[in-house]
Image: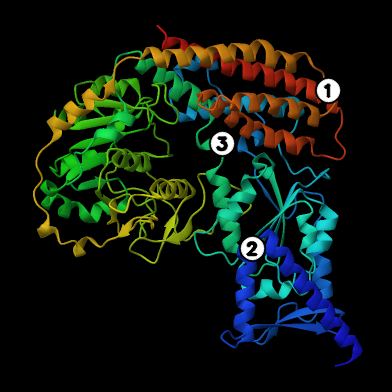
Amino acid sequence: MTEAEQQLQNAVTTTFLANLSFLSEYDNNLYQRVDELSRMINNGTYTEKYSLEFIMENGDFDLYDKVNDKYLYKRNPKKINDDLVKQIQFDKKNSIFNIEEHFTRNKSFQVNKENKFELDNEIECTIATNNDMHCYSKVLKDFLGNKKKRLKEIKKFIFLGTLLGRHIPRIAEKIDADIYLVVEKNLEIFRLSLFTVDYTILANKGVIFSIMDEEGQDKKIENFLDLGFLDNYLLKFSTTNINVDEYIDKILTYLISQKPTIYDYNRTLYLKINRTTKVLSHRYNTLKINEINDKCNFFKNRPILYIAAGPSLDENIKWIKKNENKFFIVTVGAAYKKLLLNDIKIDMITTLDEKNVLDKIQFDDESVNQIKPNTIILASCSTSPKILEKLSSKNLFLFETQIPFIKENITFSGYSIGEVTLDILLKMNAKNIYLIGLDLSLNQDTGSTHSIDSNSMSGVYDLNAEKSREFISLKEGVFSIEGNLMETVSTTPIFYISIKYLEYLTSGLDENIKIHNLSKHGAYLKNTIRTKIESLNIDTFSEIEFINEKLISFLSEHSSSSISEASQQDIKNDITFLTKLLNEDIKLIKIEDYKNYEEFSSKAFLLLSIVQEEKFSFIYLILNNYYKNIFPYLSYHFNDIKIKNESKKIKNIKEIFILQIEDIIKDYILCLDRLLK
């Protein structure tokens, strides 16, 4: 070995040991995995697939793939690293752009927000939100076109793949981001990069490593996205283009799951809260889930067959009919008519959707008249009044969602009735639940979202279409995930949101609770038991005792048809807090002049932090969603090194901000007042 070679070896060894020391403190789990791989290599129990080679004529390191007999840098690492550094500029290129589509529209839409308490459905609420956001883009004359601009700063940066990482310190020095994410699918490649790059440079600000994490272990990526989540409007990245698609999919799907347009602030205020406060003051029976959770024992020895409206329902309808008396059958609004058509008994129907149109699609007069008097119906408090009027009887019970108005009540969250119904059954202490049609994936032959004759807003996707990564959308894209009874299944962004919520919902369940997933077309739902329907020893199931009348009586006993004094006191306290917020905190923002965006945004977020202290109030959910809509757009607009007339622009957007925030709070107070009469 020449002296130069010895010096090179000493240098890479020193770098490697320094990185190990850094990781042992900074990310000990990753350190342990790297250390274990090193031990396996040294004792011969692992055969290296890659080797580190110094290309003398190029003056840099290359990575040799022993299996495929090729150099990953093509023996020209210096040029490739230079190109990677050169590609990263202070612009929108090489980034994931995550700003709501409202701001791309150079027009407002017709909706009568003067009559906002009569907003009828999700679409009208979305239009109202679009019009609110249009006020900002109109005054700023910025509709997110292709106009080029040089950014002042890049706050979050992602390294998609490391290879030997020689480009990483140079990009970090150039960008100086607030936090970095480093992802690499191959632990052996990452280990070799520890010889050639000093990762401590990233830790000066903050870095999260996601290295060869197992399927489903996406917490590190999620943690990165959650930190300064409003800065996710522009996620700049550098990519090696080797095994990175999976990581891009994970990032995009998580961003989709956090989009404020899933359930925006106008929908929360004018559909959910407006309707909820009306029905709670109209003497409907509202379930006290906290009491039910403590005392319900009806399902200790009774298996529940929970039937949703996914594609797997179609192929199991005969089996359901044959075995209907061996289960307590629970279904959803989109599926119950199919069961009625097949003369299948229904013990309980659940519904969540606020759409008035469901009065004609799901709960039309003819179908409602076929529901037997002893069938229990559970409906969210924001269900269309037209539907509630049809169903109003001794067997109709309402449930609260997200945050309770009834003191100490347990509420339900979730994007769809699919996960909410399962949560309800778990809160009713069900021990054995069998799922059919809770697919949360597409029909793998036709691309359909729901079963045939489903009474839902079903759709059909092209299973062969390639998903674009150039934009982030709730409504577009098909991607593959692990299947329940199939190796993989195709699903959609909307379904993925429900899958992740179910994963959260079923984590940490008592080992005595068994959830059997019988859905052939379904996605794998973590913490459920994959079960082929033909493998069930159904002959051992006994016909169950009919309990609906007893259960109706129990639910009636543990319901409330009025707002208690304790609940009213909490509501009064909420109103007092909000009145002070209007008269003092918001007034301070109104009278102050701001020189730049940083001054204005810091005061705006101080206001949100004050509201956050009232964490049991709906107002925080509403305002937080409002902020998630507007501030990514504003941050991007003012992140411009050549910004002009900044103080004038701030004055204009401050006026819009104050007007809209005041309207939201005043309308929320009007809703609360109903519960005090």
Image spot of residue 60 (x, y percent): 84, 78
Q: Secondary structure at mark 1?
A: helix
Q: Is residue 545 above or below residue 67?
A: above
Task: Report the colour scheme.
Answer: rainbow
Give the quarter of the figure containing the C terminus: top left
Instruction: Choose top left, top right, bottom left or bottom right for residue 395.
Output: top left
Q: Amino acid at mark 1?
A: Lys
Instruction: Choose top left, top right, bottom left or bottom right for residue 330.
Output: top left
Whether residue 531 is visible, yes or no, is: yes
Image-based side of 345 in relation to 484, left or right = left
The residue to which callout 1 is attached is 648
Query: Quick one: label 2 or label 1, which is nearer the N terminus?
Result: 2
Q: Nearer the viewer, mark 2 or mark 1?
A: 2
Q: Residue furthest right?
A: 3
Q: Amino acid at mark 2?
A: Asn
Task: Measure the alpha-carbon separation of dots 3 and 2.
Answer: 35 Å
Q: Secondary structure at mark 3?
A: helix
The residue to which callout 3 is attached is 260
Q: Is residue 97 above or below residue 602?
A: below
The residue to which callout 2 is attached is 28
Query: Quick one: label 1 or label 3, which is nearer the N terminus?
Result: 3
Image spot of residue 214 (x, y percent): 52, 65
Q: Amino acid at mark 3?
A: Pro
